[in-house]
Image: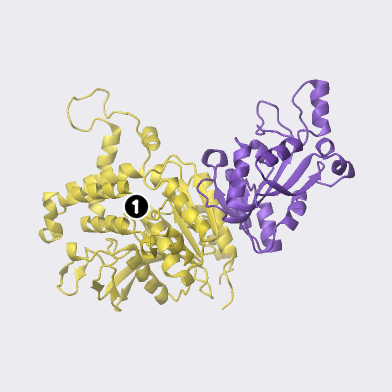
Amino acid sequence: MRADLKVIEPWISANTQVLDLGCGDGTLLAYLKEKKNVQGYGLENDADEITKCVVKGVNVIEHDLDEKGLGKFADQQFDTVIMTQALQAVRRPDEMIDEMLRLGKEGIVTFPNFGYWRCRYYLLCYGKMPMSKSLPHTWYNTPNIHLCTFKDFEILCRQKNIKILNRTVVDADFEQSRSAKMMPNLFAEFAVYRITRN
Amino acid sequence: MPNSPENNIKDKLSAMTGSVGVIKPQTLHFDQPLKLVCGKVLRQYDLVYETYGELNKEHSNAILICHALSGDHHAAGYHSKSDPKPGWWDSCIGPGKPIDTHHFFVVSLNNLGGCGGSTGPTSINPDTGELYGPDFPIVTVKDWVESQARLADVLEICSWVAVVGGSLGGMQALAWSINHPNRVKHAVVIASTAKLSAQNIAFNEISRKAITSDPDFREGYFARENIIPAKGLMLARMIGHVTYLSDASMGEKFGRDKKSPDFNFNYGVEFEVESYLNYQGERFTKNFDANTYLLMTRALDYFDPAADFDGSLEAAIATAKCSYFVVSFSTDWRFSPERSEVLVEAMIKARKSVTYSEIDAPYGHDAFLIATPRYIDVFSAYMGRVAKEITHEG
């Protein structure tokens, strides 16, 4: 089982409506459907991932988020809007968060922490853009165009009057280590945030 | 004996060729009057259809194929061993193809008003003993669905595991899901739309004008004089054909290629694209009836299932109980991806199961007939899922 699913699952109520932005091969939606009878829709623009979703029986909608946005979807149409590991890859993460909370009562986002000590160490020692297992791309071909730290994200939420309902910080294997819990912005590699505007 | 070695070899062969083989069309006569949306009644009529694959014991593996403007019942396979061309959707129907005849029993009919053998303008009107011609009543997508439902009754198919169609055929699949929610489990709507745009209607009107203004049209009674409005029908087809292709596909196919190295400085055929359109148009006049062309374009114009629900497509789709698979093609400017997206949005609002794919293909509207790998992949994946859901309870 994918580690982030374990974190996300308790935050989704049974029989609710979920939208997964950038749903990949549909693992999360298939899991939520099976475990919680969630009616989910996934947006995805990669042809192979879409076919994998279709095989799994996941409702997948071919859609380029950056190009088409979410304007066509109605307000408060979903209970939860999820975006895993993609916020840093969209053109305007701030607008994306607004849109997520327009469509859904709650939002769940996961992203890599650029404040993780290894990133800081890499930049400090080598003077180059950090590369790691979670950030495997070079600066010129990375899809991650808006990397941020946990602190950055939380400041943005505060500015936007967005309430953080839950935050789970994890290491590279999505395990909740003690050091990550104590000093998340330094020792956690990923975070899963549950946010709302209500 | 389904498992004899001989049959196995046959199966393997057919799987390799991917063809349903030589097919014989069948005809069913219906005596129960059909009240049409226009108010008129068809007292009796024939429907011509073909089937591919085997109907299972539970009658739970049947798929209905709905044809588009110029299509007919001959969707797959060949009519004889010397038949040079297979049916119009042979790319997608057959063993190992997306609509896999190993799993499904496929029914494909010629719609009422057509000219492929089902009752239409080229049939004899039993009331007068003469050809219907222009007196054949205008039938709509809804009427087609009703006639298809009666065909299903005769074939003892309570519920289609899927109703599948492209373009005008997709409209029928959509109408099935709304008008007979308990009789369809999956509706596959390809390169289609919930209603025509003003531009679509405009193109249809130009096509109709081309036909009706041909002096040989004779108010539609041309057959009585043993003539056909060939020029008008040809022109209509040429206009239609341009809207089925894309600028890119025409550019790729013909570019500015010339018939001869030098210009002749006259108005004859100078470019390859002109020659192609003339050829397509001319061929069409030999196979298609002008009155049917008028009728089919009108059925397209009138289609608007939301109209019965105060203009709300969401409310129309809310009545459905099926899952939807919607497909569009990037270069289709007749029914563009945006038109499919409108459908998908309404389906999501109505909380229906829906899968949507926009296939990147250069072939314009015609792409739904062409086996591009991505299209075949995702279509096969969806139909594979449908096959898995086939119930085996009585």
Residue beneath disc 1: B196
Above-or-below relation of B317 to B391: above
Viewer-nearest residue: B219 or B392: B219
Question: Number of callouts in the render?
Answer: 1
Where is residue B263 shown, x and y percent of the image? 23, 24
Viewer-nearest residue: B352 or B203: B352
Classify 10 Å Cα crowding around label 1: few (below 14), some (14-19), many (20 and above). Answer: some
Chain A, which colour? purple
- Of all residues, the one furthest to the top in this rendering is A127
Viewer-nearest residue: B73 or A62: A62
Above-or-below relation of B279 to B106: above
Q: Is residue B163 visible?
A: no
| Residue A190 quadrant | top right
Q: In what quadrant of the picture does the C terminus of chain B appear?
A: bottom right
- Amino acid marked by disc 1: Leu
Chain B, which colour? yellow
